[in-house]
């Protein structure tokens, strides 16, 4: 098979496009494939109306390497004069309009960038960082343009750190499909307002639950846009559990300090015993389990705080609103009467947000999906050694976590 026929077959070219010449430059380790249009079936790419040739413009595209040789496609692309649209350039089947990489090359770059950092891919593909960043941006724009305004029933709202010094971005995700829907700078009310403003009235009506922590700006934004928010806002159980764990630890630290003054070291090195969950406690040794059983059955203040924490954990199992409400109110009474200031403080927070906690209990909604995506976002940030540009950070989040259709769809037989 001749080299021209080989590349025509590899590229899937059919009339009116033909391979005119293949030039091998061995010293430079480069292959350049010259393609031309045979002049037949000229039509306006916008309206498909038959048009006359106006002139040609030489264009080049980076393609996948041929063995170790860098490969470039070069073509004299005709421009036609359309009665309606004027002088326009024909589209080529191997690349998107305006692109400087073939569809197959972009697919390969997208695959690699999903696995590692742009810098690493740039070294392997022998490209600049900026050019690969451009491929990533085009992929995200392409994916967002293809995303349909489909209904979303359960969303999660969370913030994730952009840089140090308490700089954050707001991330909204689709809990059912585990994908990021929206990213905005900051974590104020206006950041979430813009998400709701972009939704259609039909999409707003289909929202059944909004999982979030107890951050007031997010609550206020949802109250302003979501009808029936009283039964749809669900406060995350893990956020409540974190506050309870911190309160138990505060009780332990204060009591440990008081006991040490008396020479009592019972609470020495017991922090994680009080904070670990049932799964980790099951892995304790027999001696550790015996020691912890003695502590939690004692009259220590931290033992009472721990019992409140564990009881609260069980209250998330209810399925009926009335029963759940009564159980949580009993727990609140216990916590307020405990005379343990850290537990009373948490009880006050729970009482203020009890309506949203009950919603989460009845709907069995948590923000676990948001936390999982947040962990992936932090991996993206660490892999890139941080971001100094917020727009690039948002683009990277949507690229890796948006569940977007990123690949070019062209008349080119490539299977990414």
Image (cartoon, helix red, strand yellow):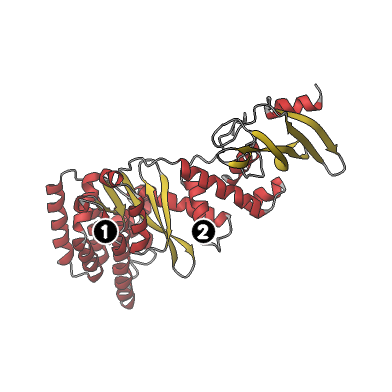
Name the residue carrying label 2: 391
Q: Earlier in the sequence, mark 2 or mark 1?
A: 1
Q: Against 167, is 197 above or below?
A: above
Q: Is residue 174 above or below residue 389?
A: above
Please identify, in this view, whether the residue under mark 2 or under mark 1 is nearer the observer.
2
Report whether residue 273 is seen. Answer: no
Measured in 3D between alpha carbons, the distance from the residue under mark 2 to the one under mark 1, in whole angstroms, is 51 Å
* Disc 1: CA contacts within 10 A as few (<14), some (14-19) or many (>=20): some
Image height check: is 307 above or below 165?
above
Quarter residue 191 falls in: bottom left
The residue at the far top in this view is 1
Q: Give the position of the C terminus as an image quadrant.
A: top right
**Residue sitting nearer the eye, 331 or 83:** 83
Residue 10: image location, x then y, percent: 71, 28
Viewer-closest of 215 and 96: 96
Residue 98: give x, y in percent of width and height.
Answer: 62, 45
- Element class at badge 2: helix
**Residue at 55% over, 39% down:** 84
Residue 336 x/y as whole percent: 16, 66
Q: Please name the residue that numbered disc 1 is placed on.
A: 296
- Identify the residue at horizontal 29%, vertical 55% (top origin): 293
Q: Is residue 149 above or below residue 412?
A: below
Q: Nearer the viewer, residue 405 or 401?
A: 405
Estimate how packed mark 2 is, as few (under 14), some (14 to 19) or many (20 or more) residues with alpha carbons within 10 Å.
some
């Amino acid at each position: 098979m001749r080299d021209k026929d080989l590349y025509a077959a590899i590229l899937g070219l059919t009339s009116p496009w033909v391979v005119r010449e293949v030039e091998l430059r061995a010293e430079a380790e480069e292959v350049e494939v010259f393609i031309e249009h045979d002049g037949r079936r000229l039509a306006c790419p916008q309206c498909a109306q038959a048009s006359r040739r106006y002139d040609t413009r030489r264009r080049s595209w980076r393609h996948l390497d041929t063995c170790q040789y860098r490969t470039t496609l070069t073509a004299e692309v005709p421009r036609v004069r359309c009665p309606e649209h004027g002088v326009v350039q024909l589209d080529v089947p191997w690349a998107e309009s305006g692109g400087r990489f073939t569809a197959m090359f972009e697919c390969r770059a997208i695959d690699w960038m999903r696995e590692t950092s742009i810098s690493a891919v740039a070294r392997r593909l022998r490209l600049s960082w900026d050019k690969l960043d451009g491929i990533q941006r085009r992929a995200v724009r392409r994916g967002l343009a293809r995303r349909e305004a489909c209904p979303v029933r359960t969303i999660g709202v969370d913030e994730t750190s952009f840089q140090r010094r308490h700089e954050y971005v707001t991330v909204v995700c689709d809990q059912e499909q585990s994908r990021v829907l929206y990213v905005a700078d900051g974590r104020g009310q206006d950041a979430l307002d813009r998400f709701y403003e972009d939704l259609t009235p039909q999409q707003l009506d289909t929202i059944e639950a909004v999982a979030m922590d107890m951050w007031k700006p997010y609550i206020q934004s949802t109250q302003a846009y979501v009808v029936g928010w009283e039964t749809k806002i669900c406060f995350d159980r893990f956020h409540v559990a974190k506050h309870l764990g911190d309160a138990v630890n505060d009780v332990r630290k204060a009591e440990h300090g008081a006991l040490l003054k008396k020479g009592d070291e019972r609470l020495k090195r017991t922090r994680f015993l009080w904070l670990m969950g049932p799964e980790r406690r099951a892995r304790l040794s027999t001696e550790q389990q015996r020691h912890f059983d003695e502590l939690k059955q004692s009259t220590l203040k931290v033992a009472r705080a721990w019992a409140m924490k564990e009881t609260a954990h069980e209250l998330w199992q209810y399925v009926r609103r009335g029963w759940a409400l009564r159980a949580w109110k009993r727990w609140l009474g216990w916590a307020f009467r405990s005379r343990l200031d850290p537990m009373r403080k948490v009880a006050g927070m729970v009482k203020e947000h009890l309506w949203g906690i009950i919603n989460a209990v009845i709907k069995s909604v948590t923000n676990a999906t948001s936390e999982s995506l947040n962990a992936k976002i932090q991996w993206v940030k660490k892999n890139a050694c941080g971001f100094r540009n917020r727009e690039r950070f948002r683009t990277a989040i949507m690229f890796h976590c948006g569940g977007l259709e990123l690949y070019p769809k062209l008349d080119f037989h490539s299977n990414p």
